[in-house]
Amino acid sequence: MLGVKRGYARLMHSYLTTFPCVALLGVRQCGKTTLLQTLGSQWTHFDLERRADYAVLSRDPDAFFRLHPRRIAIDEAQVFPEIFPALRVAIDEHRSEKGRFVITGSSSPALLRSVSESLAGRVGIIEMAPFSWEEVTETAGRDSFLKRLQERRTTPADLIERLRPRGELAEAHQFWFRGGFPEPWLNPGDEFRSRWVDQYIQTYLFRDVKRLFPGLDDVRFRRFLEMLGGLSGRVLNYAEVARALSVSQPTARDYFDIAHGTFIWRAIPAYTRNTVKRVVKHPKGYLRDSGLLHALLRIPDGGALSSHPQMGASWEGMVVEEIIRQLNTLGVAHEYSYYRTGGGAEIDLVLEGAFGRVAMEIKYTSTVEGRDIRGLRDFVTECKARLGVVINNDVAARHYGENLLGLPFTHL
């Protein structure tokens, strides 16, 4: 486990041959700084949370980039937002030269906006996350369902033919319970994991959020964080959350925006187009890391998780996140949403991209009956989806019918 290879490394080095700058964005402690170490000894690193490095860069950003015109890696760039206009000027002075800068950033809803506005057309953005299932099993980079999906001419049968599992079901359950943050994987032990997660939550709240939003009511925001465990996997009702916190609806929405923008929470919009049925339009969301979710829910072990009321929502969120993490690792542009009708029909994840429209249902069970996929079949037909997939815990991938597949999570 100490030698876990990140799937993002291949993408970062590929982007460096395409763009003058690469931005690695993601939640704290997901491995961004470690990934910078793969750049090689020719690169010079600056960490803006280190006082001396901050002083060097902040004194005169334009002069800094004239003195350091290439092979510069800057960690935690959100600490000094003035860096982005100066970086744009530096890039434009040698616009055709590729692979000059790498920046990382975390915990700032304004960060992506700054990167997108100041560096538009000049930067390749990689959204990083903690370890994925393919990374902890050390199978990142090999043939996979999502890789095959990128070829539009691939038939449903070809998508699952001779697809191998990445690990055993017990290993998948261990990953599900522990989540993907690297530090607890690199330092095994329940006591360490428990203490680390508690301290992580404290650090996130008191260092990052309070620094970025100094006027935030930290007592109410702490209560909001504690509520996220119970809200994960649910369609959101901002009015209910606002009443529970004794805040206004706009404030409740701001809290969700902060959680999403700092990469703790993933907001899933409702799918509302190409449908003739009355659909739910409220967003849905998940805590992005299942280990963090279980810590907030005070679930002590895998046994307690299996009987917890949030078990199904937790499994669903973990699978959704794994799919998005793998697509981001591949550098595949995509949009995601969920679908629910007023009559109760639901699709857990709708993916759209150059690969087409793919509907996914997530089941914890091993056996899937015909009635379990009726809604999936209807969606594929009515919304002209390329494919419907049931992610489950079966022992093998199966073909359920025209454009309908069953795929075990272990094979994802």
Image (cartoon, rainbow, N blue to C red):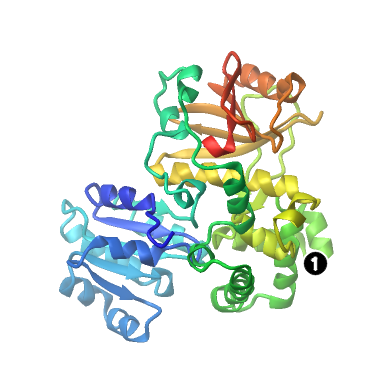
Residue 235's spot in the image, x, y percent?
74, 45
Left or right of 55 on screen, residue 129: right
Front residue of 325 and 217: 325
- Residue 50 quadrant: bottom left
- Residue 364 quadrant: top right
Quadrant location of the N terminus in the rendered image: bottom left
Is any atom of residue 86 visible in this view? Answer: no
Mark 1 belongs to which amino acid? Answer: Leu
Is any atom of residue 180 visible in this view? Answer: yes
Left or right of 153 on screen, residue 55: left
At mark 1, the secondary structure is helix
- State the count of labels: 1
Residue 266's spot in the image, x, y percent?
60, 52
Q: In this rendering, is residue 219 above or below 136?
A: below
Residue 317's spot in the image, x, y percent?
64, 47
Q: What residue sits 67% from the left and 46% below the top?
A: 315
Q: In this rendering, is residue 286 above or below 193?
A: above
Q: Which residue is mark 1?
A: 245
Front residue of 116 and 165: 165
Q: Residues within 10 Å of mark 1 (few under 14, many from 20)?
A: some
Front residue of 115 and 409: 409
